[in-house]
């Protein structure tokens, strides 16, 4: 191999020239240019020159797009995204994985399209959590729209866990309920029941007893949950809350049923009860807050 054919700078310059129109070049030669961009990207990566490798992969992706090869365009865009992550260029991580996802969708492939968004979300969890949530959400929607909910279970859990980290407990519970709905469509009864119990625990952790109770009542309309061990566990927890019995809540939170939930949810359960138990008891129908005033005869 000659030095010019392995020199990435020369490869890039030659490729750029092939894509520019001039008096002597009326048509861009994207096919030849793309092959050169790909060679340059690999050479830069071998040199560990990540910035230039990223740019070369981005140009190679553009080249594959121009020659109507969206699958290869997506692959190169994912390579560029991974390098952007190494370089800490978080906006580009999101942009590149989104573009890769769009190319996969052009191929009619919802699974890799969703996977690309999930990779972006995972990369951004610590640095840009709000964007990570959006990516997880969009990744779920792609699979939902294609009737592949069962492939999204881990994405729902990842999004819910991130919401817990952000202390957005209602949103975290909502993602578990969404997982429950997806599991219902997929006849995955065990996953469905675990999702419902997780949502109830999250509401309790956020000391929103009324929402936990409502969630339990709504979920109990589903026959699979009504007859499940997860239902019995939730019932014990809620009954202990109604009694204002902290020790019983702690006992219920140690159950083996809870031990089979996601680690994030287990950690929340272990911290129960939170908030003022007596206030919850007072707010219940028939609680001290509802005692009749004997002098009030209206």
Image (tube, helix red, strand yellow):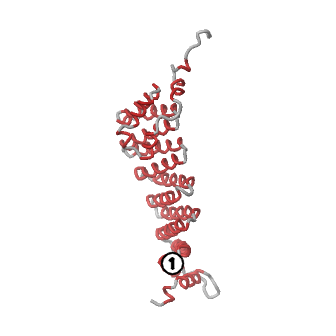
Above or below, 96 against 22 in this view is above
Q: Position of residue 27 (x, y in %)?
A: 58, 82
Q: Residues within 10 Å of mark 1 (few under 14, many from 20)?
A: many
Residue beneath disc 1: 44
Question: In the picture, which quadrant includes the C terminus?
Answer: top right
Query: Which residue lies at the image location 45% right of the left edge and 33% below the top edge?
Result: 216
Question: In the picture, which quadrant includes the N terminus?
Answer: bottom left
Q: Nearer the viewer, residue 5 or 14?
A: 5
Q: Nearer the viewer, residue 135 or 31?
A: 135
Q: Position of residue 240 (x, y in %)?
A: 43, 28
Q: Nearer the viewer, residue 266 or 176?
A: 266
Q: Nearer the viewer, residue 89 or 215?
A: 89
Q: Is residue 165 left or right of residue 224?
A: right
Query: Which residue lies at the image location 65% right of the left edge and 87% below the top edge?
Result: 23
Q: Position of residue 277 (x, y in %)?
A: 51, 29
Q: Give residue 233's quadrant in the image.
A: top left
Q: Helix, strand, or loop for circle 1?
A: helix
Q: Position of residue 116 (x, y in %)?
A: 48, 61
Above or below, 55 against 191 in this view is below
Above or below, 28 against 212 in this view is below
Query: Furthest residue to the right?
Result: 23
């Amino acid at each position: 191999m000659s030095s010019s054919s392995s020199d990435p700078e020369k490869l890039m310059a030659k490729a750029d020239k092939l894509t520019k129109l001039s008096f002597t070049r009326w048509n861009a030669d994207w096919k030849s240019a793309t092959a050169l961009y790909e060679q340059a990207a690999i050479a830069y990566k071998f040199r560990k020159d990540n910035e230039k490798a990223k740019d070369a992969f981005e140009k190679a992706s553009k080249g594959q797009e121009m020659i109507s090869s969206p699958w290869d365009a997506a692959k190169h865009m994912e390579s560029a995204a991974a390098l952007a992550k190494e370089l800490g260029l978080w906006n580009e991580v999101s942009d590149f994985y989104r573009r890769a996802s769009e190319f996969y969708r052009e191929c009619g492939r919802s699974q890799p399209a969703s996977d690309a968004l999930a990779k972006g979300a995972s990369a951004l969890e610590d640095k840009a959590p709000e964007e990570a949530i959006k990516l997880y959400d969009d990744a779920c929607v792609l699979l939902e729209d294609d009737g592949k909910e069962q492939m999204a279970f881990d994405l729902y859990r990842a999004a819910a866990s991130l919401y817990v980290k952000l202390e957005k407990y209602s949103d975290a519970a909502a993602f578990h309920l969404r997982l429950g709905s997806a599991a219902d469509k997929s006849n995955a009864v065990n996953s469905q029941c675990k999702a419902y119990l997780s949502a109830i625990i999250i509401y309790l952790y956020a000391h929103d007893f009324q929402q936990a109770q409502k969630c339990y009542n709504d979920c109990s309309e589903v026959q699979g949950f009504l007859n499940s061990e997860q239902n019995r566990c939730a019932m014990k927890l809620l009954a202990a809350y109604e009694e204002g019995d902290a020790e019983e809540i702690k006992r219920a939170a140690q159950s083996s049923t809870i031990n089979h939930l996601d680690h994030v949810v287990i950690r929340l359960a272990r911290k129960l009860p939170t908030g003022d138990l007596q206030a919850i008891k007072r707010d219940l129908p028939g609680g001290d807050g509802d005692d009749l005033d004997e002098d009030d005869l209206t």
